Amino acid sequence: MFWVAFYGCLLAEVIPVPIEVPLSRQDAGSQQIGFLLGSCGVSLALTSEVCLKGLPKTPSGEIIQFKGWPRMKWVVTDTKYLTKPSKDWQPHIPTANTDTAYIEYKASKEGTVMGVAVSKISMLTHCQALTQACNYCEGETLVNVLDCKKDMGMWHGVLTSVMNRIHTITVPYAVMKACPMSWVQRVHIHKARVALVKCRDLHWAMMAHKDQRDTNLSSIRMLIVADGANPWSVSSCDAFLNVFQSHGLKPEVICPCATSPEVLTVAIRRPGARGAPLPARAILSMGGLSHGVIRVNTEDKNSALTVQDVGHIMPGALMCTVKPDGPPQLCKTDEIGEIVINSRAGGTMYYGLPGVTKNTFEVIPVNQAGAPIGEIPFTRTGLLGFVGPGSLVFVVGKIEGLLMVSGRRHNADDLVATALAVEPVKTVYRGRIAVFSVTVFYDERIVIVAEQRPDASEEDSFQWMSRVLQAIDSIHQVGLYCLALVPANTLPKTPLGGIHICETKQNFLEGNLHPCNILMCPHTCVTNMPKPRQKQPVDVGPASMLVGNLVAGKRIAQATGRELGVVEDQDLIRKHQFLSEALQWRAQTDPDHVLYVLLNAKGVAVCTATCAQLHKRAEKITATLMERGGLNTGDNVVLLYPPGIDLIAAFYGCLYAGVIPVTVRPPHPQNLAATLPTVRMIIDVSKAACILTTQPLMRILRSREAAASVNVKTWPTIIDTDDLPRKRPPHIYKPPTAEMLAYLDFSVSTTGMLTGVKMSHAAVSTLCRSIKLQCELYSSRQIAICLDPYCGLGFVLWCLSSVYSGHQSILIPPLELESSLPLWLSTLSQYKIRDTFCSYSVMEICTKGLGTQTEMLKARGLNLSCVRSCVVIAEERPRLALTQSFSKLFKDLGLSPRAVSTAFGSRVNLAICLQGTAGPDPSTVYVDMKSLRHDRVRLVERGAPQSLPLMESGTILPGVRVIIVNPETRGPLGDSHLGEIWVNSPHSASGYYTIYGEESLQADHFNTRLSFGEPHTLWARTGYLGFIKRTELLDASGDRHDALFVVGSLDETLELRGLRYHPIDIETSVSRSHRSIAESAVFTWTNLLVVVAELSGSEQEALDLVPLVTNVVLEEHHLIVGVVVIVDPGVIPINSRGEKQRMHLRDSFLADQLDPIYVAYNM
């Protein structure tokens, strides 16, 4: 059918483009075939009835539109559908001119498909040359196993056969798969003179021949091996001869040949005379080949490549070899080069691609001086080789299989041959191995992907993989970057069952390969890493630095919030000295003013508290404490409450009683084992004399489940405050001075350290005053808070601020959002809230959970145009990507893009920055990540490569001074220099609360002095790196605004290769590398970088992440990942502020408690 259609086209003088039958929309490479058909202007498709039936259809029976294909009319050419021409019709026989006769497709290394146009004269000349070279005679029989639509199968099995009237028997690939011996049987039955095969057909026939006794191959005069140019063809030919010589096969009939789509046949071995010596073979050194030279290998058998000749070039052709890269310079006799041919029998152009055509079909070789050698144009064959003794042609590889690693050339086919030589029988399915290179970190890296047999064990596979690594290292002296095994039959196939390399590479890079085993070896093969940075001793003193900055015209990096001002009014002084007095004063002067409203998941106010109610409730708690607690003034009392008003009342109850409250997050009833030990630890460290809590929590503390993780017999006195008697305390305590302790603030840092800080009454009131001024809070205002109220600024806003400023706080416990996502946003809309405070966790829940529902929320009438400031309370670098996506998503609901900002606090000072109402909008700068690793700040343009966007952390609070200091010399730094952020403020904490009273740390962190400059000011060290930049914006007083940019916590930074890395930067790259990475975290373990990635997709994607994570960290951060751990979502521990607990994760990893999906140790 195909032949008839092909010759029909030739007679009709239309140009046939033979292609494979597409079996599905997703056929590997079918989109590129579509591009070819489109560029050739094809609009008609001829096919047979059987093929048409097999094509995928739409439900209405139409043939589907294949991806990337032009619209085509399908015509069936079976005889019953055709009308006979009239008797006197004679076809016009066209003359053999230079017009195109047909187009043969070819796929390039990059996967693009191009059409090689063969002219009528070339087609005829090529057939004549083949007839002469192979000595074809009329009436011979030829058995063809190759594809008739292109290449040797077409040239010998169709065109030359018809020209010489040869009987041709074609054995389709499908028959071969079912019965590998079929072609040998055809040769035997029909006494065929010529057989046209590939190495794999020799191999399969050899494997299957055991049941065949009476096969006779003595009739064959030419066994043409179409892929004789492959490195493994020698062994296939030898092995086949070995088996079938006893069946009459003569050694001299084996004729390897070399072909190329552009030149058609390059060279073919002519059958030898009976008994004449067989041609010699070249045994070449692999090392020499990798440098592009021919060296005969004499010593090491292992690193030798044996190649057989592919005979002489075709009649009427000229051949030379040129350098494969750069100008086409002629090679010396001992150099390997690309074979170029001049012949009338080759292709004429790439159809429709004049630019590429010129570089391939019109090459004029040049000498060493660069002068052209002649006028004759040559065509590139894409084959690498040399001319041996007796003008025999030797081919050692293909340009498209060339892998250039560190300046040396390796051939993909050679690497496949080495991998196949490592007894793959137990592991590799049908010898299916793909080799390609990917560019990572300025060089090509070799990747080998093989299909794994369904019955292969994990142990066999790993053994095979490690042996392949060793073999390739010793034979080719090159390191493998990645070796992956995928399930059988999952690699994309070419139409005739080979592996579609380009699509395999694409799948690898996109994370769609789904390996079942993987081995990455970046440590051994990435040899071009920059040298580790050697830190120089700091010889320059802080004074010189300061003078240097002044000389350079740089100001010292410091910034100050506005003045706190003086409180004149006498009773205001009394009211504001202590919060306990402020509450009593409010209860007297404005008893019915509602201070707090607590909402449940439905958005219903389940509890409210007026000034008087809060005061009375606090008094009840005070009376109970005095009666039942047996406490002394200044004892510590733990408050264990869910977020709500009870917590606030208990706090003021403690102040009234003269005891020190310590707020602690209650344990999670479903996860006591993880959460209760932290509660126990805070109770032990704070030496609490008593616990105030609710009845349900009291039951949990004493339960059998709790006993499994802590000692429940040694709790201090537990008092439940649910049903208290109506009693008033005999007196309310008033501290003698404002320097006395007000409360303790305990928090677990991201590095897993539990730190408690002491907050004095003076610090509490100045902090509340500072927030009041910054946010313009007064009694007629309403704010909404969706935060955890246990530590830091979250606690201050939830429990203290309203009592001080008198504004109403609407409290939304963040846990309620889990059952009702829109709760926070709908509250803002319903109460027309102007100012709201939340955490990153809350913002993330809204972004991920409500991102797709904005239309529905809008329809429900949700409107956020009332919100003028939405502040994220955090102790970290602002998460720009999250705040921006939040602003963008809810812009449709009226949220102003200017509304969202962040705050910044630390352990030593709970509130350093808070974007209030007066300051200019937070600015964003872009810094160069490479400089940041060297502890330098280099500002770059937006979109610059390796740039990192940083957002200002909000306006500095009134009464706060910030300075940037070199952590080593303790001298002040200049504007836009990276250093530690030090803070001086009346609301700094007064010290750590520890059991052992580490005085040195105390003095160092809370009361430290600059080594130079201002020796008298006492500063607190935040432990965060950042810089100050003077901007063009003006602040409220009309001066230029100084912006503080936080880069990250010093404790968290990773010191690798002498450079300082911030985990979040590596994690951002990792999370971007694949759509299925939900979250990631990094830490170091014995100088190795460990990346933990949460997989949100299906488990078959787990191993896809390993190379992608390794690639992205190498490319963007110049670090080699040591271990990649793939885990389920939710495994990375996150604290209440939404920060990752990387040290907890590290401990779990080292204790083998992560229960990972997969752990890859990169070699």
Image (spheres, rainbow, N blue to C red):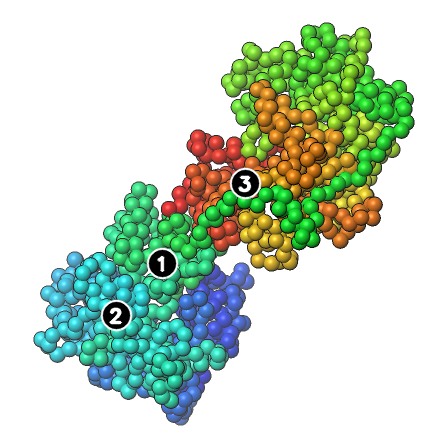
- Tell me if 396 is positioned left or right of 73 in this view: left
Quarter of the N terminus within the rendering: bottom left
Give the left or right position of residue 895, taking residue 505 as reference: right
Residue that appears at 39% across and 72% down:
325
Q: CA distance from mark 1 to mark 2?
A: 26 Å
- Labels 3 and 1 touching (C-beta < 8 A): no
Which residue bears the numbered disc 3?
A: 1053
Alpha carbon of mark 3 to alpha carbon of mark 1: how far? 40 Å
Sequence-wise first label, 1 or 2: 2
Q: Earlier in the sequence, mark 3 or mark 2?
A: 2
Which amino acid type is shown beneath numbered disc 2? Ile
Helix, strand or loop at mark 3: loop
Q: CA distance from mark 3 to mark 2?
A: 52 Å
Mark 1–mark 2 CB contact (< 8 Å): no
Report which quarter residue 158 is drawn in: bottom left
Residue 110: image quadrant is bottom left
Considering depth in this image, is 16 or 764 the residue closer to the camera?
Answer: 764
Tell me the crowding category of disc 1: few under 14, some 14 to 19, or many 20 or more residues within 10 angstroms, Cα based: many
Percent position of residue 84, x then y: 41, 84
Residue furthest left in the image = 275
Check residue 294 in the rendering and tell me which mark sits there, or answer none. 2
Image x and y of residue 440, in percent: 45, 57
Residue at label 1? 434
Query: Which percent across, then down, holds residue 450?
Result: 35, 54
What secondary structure is marked by label 1?
A: strand
| Residue drawn at point x = 81 percent, y = 23 percent | 577
Is 359 left or right of 214, judged from the image as shown?
right
In this view, the mark in front (3 or 1): 3
Q: Is residue 1158 above or below residue 995?
A: below
Q: From where the camera sits, is residue 224 visible? A: no
